[in-house]
Amino acid sequence: MNALQHLTNNQLVLLYYREPLEEIGFDGHLAGCAECLARFERLTRVLRVVAQDDVPEPAGDFEARMTERVLAAVRSQGRGRLLPFPGRFQRAARVLAAGAALAACLVLAFSVGRHLGRVEEQTLTAAQTQERVLLTALGEHLGRSRVTLVELKNREVSMKDLKDLQLAADNLVTASRLFRAAAERAGEGQIAGVMEETERLLLRFAAAPDAEAKSELDGLRKRVDSRDLLFRLQVMEAQVEKREKTFAPSSSNRSL
Amino acid sequence: MSGLGQTPPEAGAADDEGFRALVTSHARSLHRLAYRMTRNEQDAEDVVQEALLKAYRGLDKFENRSELSTWLHRITTNCAYDLLRKRVRRAEDDLPETDSEAGAVTSGLLSSTPGPDQTAHAGDIRRKVNESMERMSATERTAFVLRHYEGHTLEHIGQTLGLSLAATKQCVFRAVRKVRQDLEPLVQAS
């Protein structure tokens, strides 16, 4: 553009919002054009005033009201809780009791599943069965992780309890690593990512020396909230559960 | 004490806990967005409630690649946008056919039922901003709120509203023009 051409109002708006201008040649125009600069300053004053427009804060019980209303709506429409808790917990307890045996099965099953996914169609049924078992186990593990985090987050603890909590957290990390490795091999990056984040939080607390365990537990509680970890685990559970119900292999090289 | 997991919380508590934490973390920022779009406290609450319900029901649609707050804000934007469009449609239905010119349709109708805050505590700025917002179409208002208050890029806004970049720009330009018409005299006077 030449010096005689001024910026349009729309171009000034784009400049205000730091959006790229389509036209080239405007660099430095404002600094060298008193007229455009004055127009830009007028626009800026107005838009800054608009930005100051306050929003009334909702009442103090806003979050509680929203939570209760939504949960009531969910329940009244017959869906109940998204993931029935007691059954999950009992199944999760059984899964964890299997311990190392389960881990070995998982590794084997994923390997078999991936292999079978690539071979002829008549063997897919076996792969699907393996896959379903794995989905169930993974869903249960996610459920147990969430329950554990809820307890870590809410339970009143004495110093004596901390050791037990640390041990439990450490056990969960060990189990989680196995599931995560399996999920990663299956190309389930999202699930593996949430599991890894959970592990990191738990590990920091589990590995803390006695003198720091309480403060690490407090830090874990804050991070669980700030990262929406409980809800994200719930999301993963829901996704796994959905696929478990409507089971169908998505592609030949994805075994989870 | 017993080990973790040996004394499970009351049935349902664990499932609700994540949702409670989510609402505690995000409900107020969602309310700010909803209020800026609807300009009405009751509508804003309804929008937030609807958005949270959709989030709860749509857990399996969330992609962990994106931030949870981004996902929630997008749902809230869509809920508020739907509400604004319904208001306009209701307003159009109520108008005689001769009044169906677009500018006339949206003028004064987007916020058909002003909340108590708007009548009791409205300052000059808020009143003027309300007037400007009322003169905007649902799309203009949404684009303006997302750009001006939420700081989204025009490209992102276009994706949210299903508009091309050029159309999104025009929406924001029109919205800013209306804001300037209403607020410039006030700003100059001050």
Image (cartoon, helix red, strand yellow):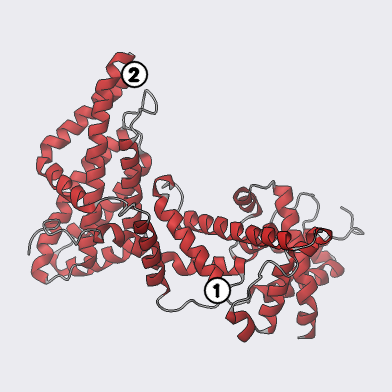
Q: Secondary structure at mark 1?
A: helix
Q: Residue at 11% of width from left, 70% of height from top?
A: A159
Q: Is A92 on the left or on the right of B120, as rendered?
A: left
Q: Where is residue A151 drawn, in percent x and y? A: 20, 62
Up-down relation of residue A68 to residue A243 (above or below): below
- Residue that extends furthest to the right in the rendered view of this protein: A4
Residue drawn at (19%, 52%) of the image:
A86
Q: Residue at x 42, y 49 (%)?
A: B58
Query: For mark 2, does the 10 Å Cα neighbourhood hold few (<14), some (14 to 19), or many (20 or more) residues?
Result: some
Residue contact between numbered discs 2 and 1, judged by CB atoms under 8 Å: no
Image quadrant occupied by the C terminus of chain A? top left
The subunit carrying tag 1 is: B
The residue carrying mark 1 is: B41
In the image, B54 versus A179, the foreground residue is: B54
Residue linked to disc 2: A118
Residue A14 seen in the current view: no
Near mark 1 (Cα within 10 A), the count class, few <14, some 14-19 or many ≥20, is many
Residue B10: x percent and y percent?
Answer: 19, 62
Question: Splitting the image into 4 quarters, where does residue B82 fall?
Answer: bottom right
Q: In front: B160, or B55? A: B55
- The subunit carrying tag 2 is A
Which residue is depicted at the point 11% across and 41% down?
A99
Q: Nearer the viewer, mark 2 or mark 1?
A: 1
Cα distance in 3D space between marks 2 and 1: 56 Å
Q: Is residue B44 visible?
A: yes
Q: Quadrant of residue B148?
A: bottom right
Q: Is residue A102 above or below residue A220?
A: above
Tell me residue B38's x, y (percent). Answer: 61, 67
- In the rendered view, would you say A186 is above or below B33? above
Residue B88, how many percent across, how many down? 69, 60
Could you tell whether B115 is left or right of B183 in the image?
A: left
